[in-house]
Amino acid sequence: MEYSVARRRMVEYQLVGRGINDKRVLEVMGRVPRHLFIEEELRDKAYGDYPLPIGENQTISQPYMVAVMTELLELKGDESVLEIGTGSGYQAAVLSELVEKVYTIERIESLAIKARDLLKYLGYRNIVTRVSDGTCGWKEMSPFDGIIVAAGAPGIPQTLVEQLKIGGRIVIPVGGDFSQTLLKGIRTEKGIKTEDITGCVFVKLIGEYGWRER
């Protein structure tokens, strides 16, 4: 099957069919070549309705989850967004086409380098990558209009809340080892106001303000 056809079906059945209605998000996910962000031997599964391994015990998220998390940021186009957990670089690529600037942090150097090189090769010029503990955020580039966390945390790190603009949004899975609840948080003058969105399963958010590495 041609990848463009697979992408179109992904958008129609997995995204629109489940209630994703942000036209900009749908257009971008119908355009970004997801298959290039995974290993060649898995590319026939690139547009399937499930996460896929990318090495180092990490995964590229299910397309629907990428769409949900992106839509929840309510992006208009002029934002500065922080991503925690670069992984394959796919989520950063999607965000890149929707905002002014993407800052993305990955704690695993081999994944960060691979993603950085691929994003550069594909022509994304508004993404800045960093190898670091994502739970600490990127203070010198803050405040951010949005933060997206692609790993499950025991709670919302206060460090990340403090790096959001007032009115800024954070999307983060929070819960235990094997399942989490996707939360949308909005920073207010008094702190963070959260809303439960859906159940989900992510790898652990490892770091000083997340889970400790065993």
Image (tube, rainbow, N blue to C red):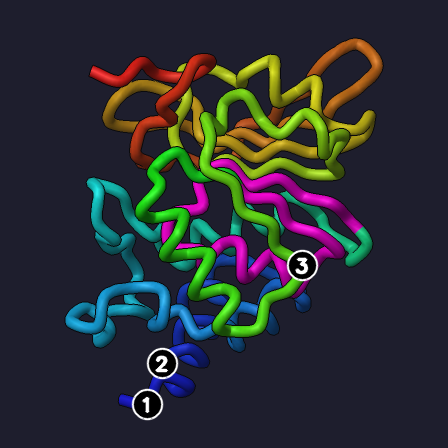
Residue under the point 41% across and 59% down: 63
Judging by the rendered image, the residue that carries numbered circle 3 is 126
Residue named by callout 1: 2
Instruction: Name which residue type carries label 3.
Output: Asn
Give yes or no for residue 44 being in the magenta stretch: no
What's drawn in magenta, residue-wise?
79-104
Q: Is residue 194 left or right of residue 18?
A: right
Residue lying farthest to the bottom in this orientation = 2
Indicate whether 164 appears above or below 45: above
Q: Based on the displayed image, in which of its 4 quarters is residue 41 positioned?
A: bottom left
The type of residue carrying mark 2 is Ala
Residue 60: x and y, percent?
A: 33, 52
Q: Earlier in the sequence, mark 3 or mark 1?
A: 1
**In the foreground, 55 or 20:** 55
Closer to us: mark 3 or mark 2?
3
Residue at the image position 24 percent from the left and 27 percent from the top: 178
Residue of label 2: 6
What's the mark number on residue 161? none
Q: Quadrant of residue 153?
A: top left
Q: Position of residue 165 (x, y in %)?
A: 79, 28
Check disc 1 and give the amino acid type: Glu
